[in-house]
Structure formats: structure tokens, C-alpha cells
Amino acid sequence: MSKNSESNHTSFSRRDILKGLATVPVIGIMGAGAISYQSEVQARSKANKIPDFGTLGSSDVTNKLTEFVAPGNKLRIGIIGNGSRGLQLLRALGFADPDWVEKNTPNGKANANLKNFLQQEDLNVEITAICDTFRIYAEIGADAVQHGAKAGARQIKETSGPKLYHNYRDLLADDLVDAVVIATPDHWHARMAIDAALAGKHVYLEKPMTLTIEEAFALREAIFQTGVTFQLGHQNRQQVSYRKAEEVVAEGLLGDVSMIETYTNRNNDHGAWIRGIHPEANRDNIDWEGFLGSAPATEFDLDRYFNWQKWFEYGGGPAGNQFTHEYDCINQVMHLGIPNTVVATGGNYHFKDPRNIPDVFNAVFNYANHGLTLTYDCTLKSKTRRDKLIMGTDASMVLSINLNVFPDNGSEKYKKFNLDPEEPVFSYNPKQDETDATTSATAKYYQERGFGYTYRNGKKVDCTYLHMLEWINCIRTKKLPSCNVQQGFEESVTYIMSNISYREQRVVKWNQEKEMIV
Amino acid sequence: MWALVTLRVAIGWHFFYEGLAKWYQPGWSAQGYLEDSQGFLAGIFHWLANQAGLIGFLDAFNITALLVIGLFLMLGFNARYATLGGIGLLVIYYLSHPAIPGVIYAAPTEGNYFFIDKNVIEFLALTVLWLFPTSNLIGVDRLLNSRRSVENKSLKPA
């Protein structure tokens, strides 16, 4: 035996050892390469202080849901305004109207939209009342609640349908309503939200928050006084790219920011707020006075009723409709608040239909207190894609549903790393499925800009659903939602300043201490 | 022979460095790659990408497999198993991202491929190495196998 083992050791010839280990030096070369590669990676990430983006855009909003889905804790919601946005909000709450379900079931198979909807968790809410000045819209809502598809595998059938109202004050007087979702024309936002708060109802309000600065003050006061839970409908607050962007800025990766660009580029009638007129609408099934409210009295006009965004009497124009989206993203990321001065210009040059809002609009928002300028350019006659751009001394961030941070050529901080300014030092680019059934050009536009879907744990989720979920969780835990009334106040004052500047052709100044236009 | 050994070491080098680069890259995950899968097995890869609990394991497994296979091929240590493992990995990569005409992936490629892409070439190269093993001649396997053959001889009845 011992003889054998001896012979084992002696069986390797010099030739065997040389040939057996011939390739080992290759490992050494690789090792040396690996060490230098590692130190380079470390130096790069250390210098750029790139946070661990894998954990950003936290998913705790969704994960906390289950503890509230106890029976008996049902939140009873009333819908005020059930037009096209109202139906989207109803879906976010878990109720899809039969028409939408049919549209998203081509060839008898659920498409991605419907599948995503069905996967939404049950929010444990009940729709007890629906109000609309157009009777058919209210009835479609009731149909969605009673006969439509339900999200989250909700098995319980609604025993009775929601009560239908054409006057929102009657809905607010209904004891079966704990909270309201308001998606009416903008000139009604403040009045309805204030009345709801005074009636003790929690409020989810579509953007823009208000149409005038006075209304913004009054609504903020009402929410502060009553203590109801208020969420403004800027669902971008749930978008992962914006949450990551906020951390990029907080980490100081961009250096000093001196300029921010925001845009709206659309080129279709729907994007210019020509939304069509319901074929069955008439004087008998529309409460025209209920629509007008405090707006100047005019003759019954279906164009004004359905395409109200075209008039400053009922909507905020490009600034109220679109800039507020861009602004709230920037405010979420940068916490800028209200600008010191605003100038705006533009005109209505291309759309010859009845309207008094501009189709070309430019505004400059100057923040002397932050040492930067925010610009907004809007055209309704070109679809060239321009994403939000935040420019800093060290890097610039291009922001939409995607996020890319490009190092600056002139950066002192990054100079030593010889970085390629064309190559992002950080990217967040979720895969965007082209077959998403984001059917209309407007829907695609919203999706690209990060107002449609986002991602949680690798799953595609509707931002509006998450935003609604946050509001409902905040009601149940008495916490402050992310897009609370102070954020809304800043949004409204900012965009309204640009509208005042455009319409009165003057520089509009804001006194930060006194909180007033000077 | 020297050409086959060089091929083995080169493929090992490539595998090892792929593993290393993924290991060092902060926050690297196969999730995006899996979500981008196309072809007839895309459903399975998409499903894998969405298994929150599984993805961390898959990432670790992929990196370890790349490193181990790469190291073994370079050393010529258990090169038969490493060759087989490498073939397996490449088949999975190809099935996830087959070079089908008209299909566009999220990550741009630096070349143009029609069914045959770099994964297929590397796969074929490994197949050649499987048919013409070299580690018994140049590689650690030479030492192990000569020892084993001595042991075998010694166990044989005289």
C-alpha cells in the first residue's frame, strides 16, 4: 500500500506538471484585470455616490394594503363627476365598466390592460353614490359598480347599486358616504372640495387643484380646519422614476441646478381637448346650470359642456391641464414651491374651433430663492418628444417614465474620472411594452411621461390605482398623503401665475413671506 | 492541439469575466434581461422575472455558474463538466433572446444576426471542445487523471 502511494507521488513527470498547469498563469492575468476593474467600479460609484437604486421607489405603499382589508372596515365612496377621467378613477378603485371590459377583451381574451386591472388588490371600498350633471354618465358609473369587472378577485356582489345624484350637495348630505372622489370641470374643484371637507368627507381631487388663487387659499384653509384627508390627483407621485429622481437630487449628484425645462408636445385633436360630444346628450339629460355653477351664464352649448377644457371659464388652459403635471413632477423631485416671478406668452394660432385658450404657450418661472429658472413650452401642433431636463453643474437629468443622468463635461467633481457626457452615469429605463393597448395618442403620451403605469416588484401597476391606494391608506391611518393640500396650493398658485401673466401680459410676482401676488 | 487549448482558455476567460462584471456591477440583476425575453419560451422567462423571491437566487446562480465554468475551462479542471455547463447556459441565453428576424430587444446589439448569433457560435465552439477534449493533455485534469489511472492500476489484482 505504502509502495503504491509512493508511486502516486512519483508518477508526475516534469512534463506532466508543466502541461497540467500550463494555463494557470492565465488566471493570474485575469486576476490582475479583475482587481483593476473592481477598483475602477468602486471609484466610479463612490465618486458619484450612486445610491442603491435597487431599493429605491419603495413598494411599501402596496405592501401595507392587506392589514386594512378586514371586513367591516369598508370605506364608502361617492363619485362626483363621472366623465372619462371618472371612469379611470373608478377602475383605480376596482370597478371597470362593461364597455371598457369589452373593449379590452379582443377575441374573447383579456388583454394586458384588463389583466393588469384584474390583478389590482381589492381596496375594500364600496361605491355608495355617484353624481354627474349628465345622467348617462352617472348611469354608466352605476353599471360599472353593479355589473362591471371587479379587481382583486373580489367575490362579494354589490347588493344594491350606488345612489345617483345630479346635485353634488345632495351627495354630500348622504350619510352613506365617507369620502368623495371629485373629477369635474376645474371651475368646480374648489367649491366642491371645500363643501365636502365641511361635510366631513375625505377628498380625492383631480388636478389642477383650483382655478383661482383665492380658491387655493380657501381650500387649503378648509382642509387644515376640518382635518379631512386630502389627496390631489397627481399620480406621478407613485412613479418609480420620479421617486428615484428625488433621491438623485437629494444625493447631490447633479450639483447646483440652474435650469429646468418642461414641455408639452401634442399633435392631435384629442390632445387639444376636442373630446367629442356624447350622441345621446341633450338639454333634458344635462343639468346645464349645474355645470355652469359660478361660471358666466351662457346659452346651452354641448361643445362647452363636453370640451370645457377649451375655455378659461372652466379650465386652466395648457398650464392648468398640462403644466401642472410637469410642475408637480418637478416639485416632487426638487421641492421648489412657488416661484418669485413668472412671465408667459403664446397665442391661439392653429385651432379655429370655438376656444379661448392658447395652442402655443411658453412660460418662464424664476426662482431667485433657489438660483434657478424653470421653463415650460407647450405646442399642440408638434409631437416632437421633449422630456423634462434638469441641468446641474455636475450632471443633467432627463426625466420621464425613464430617468437618465448624464455627467457634465465642465464638472469639477467628475473631471478626474474622464466620464463620457453621452453615457449616463445612472439610468432607470423600465421596459415599455409596445403592445400595451395604450390605445389613443393621448394615452401613449401620458404613458411616456410617466403618468400611466409604473412598476412594483417587477409588476406593472396603474399609478392612479397606487395614488388612490395611498389616499385610502392615509384615511385609515390618519397620515398625510404625498400630494396633500400644501402641494396642491403650490401647484395651483404657480400655474395660475402663468395664466395671469399670459392673459394680462405682465410680469407676475409672488411675495414668499406674505403669500400674495404683488 | 494548441488551437483547441487556446479556444478552451478563451471561452473560459469570457465566461469568467462575464461573471465577474455582473458580480461587481452594483444592483445588477437578470430581471431586465428576462423581462425582455422573446420567442416561444418568453412566457417562462417573464414568469421567472416576476418571482420576487426567486430572482436573487437566479442572479447568484448565474454569476456563480459563469465564474466556476470560466475558471474550470481556463484551468482545464473538470473541463468535461464545465463544457457541458457552459453549453447549458448558452442554450438558456439563446432561448431567452433568440436571434429571430424582426425581433427587437431592449439592449442594442453591436452586430446583425439572423438565427446565428454569438451565443450560437460559442455554443458550437464548446461542442467542438466536448468532442475533442484537451484538458487530459494540457490542464489540471492531466494530473488528476494520471493519478486516477495509477490508482486504478494499483487496485487491479496483480
Image: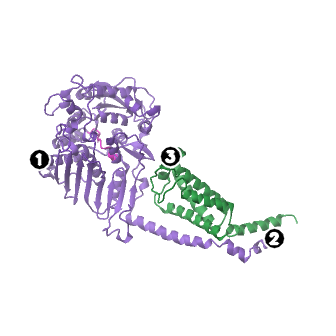
Q: Which residue is mark 1?
A: A504
A165 vs A287, nearest the viewer: A287
Percent from the top left, x then y, of residue A26? 59, 71
B22 up-or-down from A460: above or below: below
Residue type at tag 2: Asn
In this picture, is B130 found above or below A351? below
Magenta stretch in the rendered image: A227-237
The structure residue drawn at horizontal position 44% and vertical position 39%, both measured from the top left corner, is A112
* Label 2: chain letter: A
Q: Which residue is mark 2?
A: A4
Residue B49: % across, % down: 50, 48
Q: The residue tagged with tag 3: helix, strand or loop?
A: helix
Q: Residue at x 25, y 59 (%)?
A: A259
Residue picked out by circle 3:
B46
For the residues labelled 2 and 1, say whether their Cβ atoms are less than 8 Å apart. no
Q: Which amino acid lies under the numbered mark 3 shown in the image of this protein? A: His
A289 and A270: which one is in front? Answer: A270
Distance, label 2 to label 1, CA atoms, is: 104 Å
Residue nearest the observer in this picture, A57 or A275:
A275
Residue A60 in view of the camera:
yes
| Distance from the alpha carbon under mark 1 to that under mark 3 | 55 Å
Chain ID at mark 3: B
Question: Can marks 2 and 1 be said to lie on one chain?
Answer: yes
Above-or-below relation of A426 to A476: below
Q: Report the chain shown in purple.
A: A
Q: Which mark is residue A203?
A: none
Judged left or right of residue A465, residue B99 is right
From the image, which quarter does the N terminus of chain A lie in?
A: bottom right
